[in-house]
Amino acid sequence: MSRKMKLGVLTGGGDCPGLNAVIRAVVKTALHDYDMEVVGFFDGYEGLVENRYRQLKPADVSGILTLGGTILGTSNRADPFNFPVLQGDEYIYIDRSSQAVQNFERLGLDALIAIGGDGTMAASNGMAEKGLSIIGIPKTIDNDLFGTDQTFGFDSALTSAAEAIDKIHSTAQSHHRVMIVEVMGRYAGWLALASGIAGGGDIILIPELPYQIDVVCDKIKERNRKGKNFSIIVIGEGAKAEGGELVIKRKVANSPDQIRLGGISNQLAAQIEGITTLETRVTILGHLLRGGTPTAFDRILASRFGSEAVHLGYNGIFGNMVALQGNEIGKAPIKDVAGKIRKITPDSSLLKTAISLDTSLGVENINVSSDLELAK
């Protein structure tokens, strides 16, 4: 080629462990394998719209493999097609995607690597339709992104959640209490289900299966009759009672996804105490699950994703998201990923494992296929 290829990279959506590992892999692979230039945009698509960036050199990514967060910053409000602009005391939303395209072209970029979850992939699909050469990398602790068997960030959050549940066990046993641990995950139950299994939860409640409060309380009473005078419940923030509504912690006006879930565990605790008279305590892990050092699994997965994204860019394969498919790194069209949420399905081996371990899912005489179908 007559000139060096030039890549852009950004991190969008919520932060999670492993973002810096991806950035490091992108920069090192681009320089080592292809002698490319790499530009990092600050705060996700906000940096591309506002033309805020820095060139990334080897020194910039030295020592960041184990760091949580992202050295580029991120934003879950910066949708180029619905961009928040402060007008007086209120935000209005305007389409600034054309400005993002102009900045991409002025910088002479050959491709943009967008690291993020469903919101970032939806925005990236739109930018691809406007002509940008986009490569996506799937990131979310919720593990709810279509096209990939697992996202980086999930294993780290799972490890943090399982460690917290381990610690809850000792105080639950000592005080003979019902302990509820609420985890993130939005509208998918992957984090609740996996951490509940890993932490030995007695009851696991997920968004895909609206729970029956009588079934939950019967499980607690059954354990007490058998001499097990404590119970651990793991619940996803998007879970709800049968016939009930999602518990919304607050709404953020100037955000593409205005709903912030949280607090279902407090509602459940009040119900359990009212029915069983047993003392019930709540621990909401919240943003603790997003922070900290990435696990070895996530460091490796993030590194594989970052390197493969660069290889795709060099070979001119755009409009795809790199993905874990089995044990190999493949790709999925971004247009097939955008706007979709990957939920737990009846054929999930994780779900079947929980049932075989006599874990209550809050549903009486569960028929996995029909009950999950009803929960959609």
Image: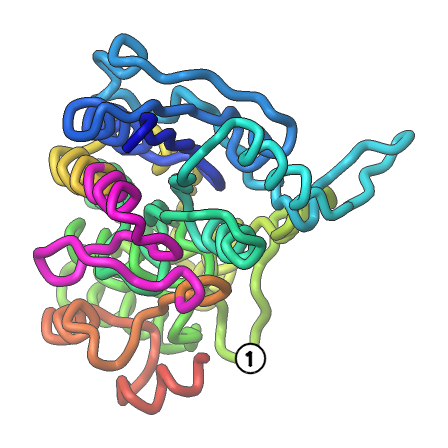
Horizontal and vertical percent position of residue 317: 30, 53
Number of numbered tags placed on the structure image: 1
Name the residue: 20% across, 80% down: 347
Q: Quadrant of residue 225?
A: bottom left
- Tell me if residue 158 can be seen: no
The answer to whether 95 appears left or right of 216 in the picture is right
Report if residue 362 lies within the magenta region.
Answer: no
> Disc 1 on helix, strand or loop?
loop
Residue at the outermost front position = 2
Q: Is residue 300 above or below residue 328?
A: above
Is the residue marked by circle 1 packed among few (<14), some (14-19), or many (20+) residues within 10 Å? Answer: few
The answer to whether 339 appears left or right of 323 in the picture is right
* Span of residues in magenta: 307-336
Name the residue: 31% across, 56% down: 192
| Residue type at numbered disc 1 | Gly
Of 235 and 49, which appears nearest the observer?
A: 49
Name the residue: 42% across, 42% down: 114
Of 348 and 70, which appears nearest the observer?
A: 70
Of 69 and 112, which appears nearest the observer?
A: 112
Horizontal and vertical percent position of residue 314: 26, 41
Residue located beneath label 1 in the image: 243
Q: Is residue 236 above or below residue 133?
A: below
Report if residue 317 lies within the magenta region.
Answer: yes
Residue at the outermost top position = 59
How is the protein colored in the picture?
Answer: rainbow
Horizontal and vertical percent position of residue 269: 46, 55
> Which quadrant: the C terminus?
bottom left
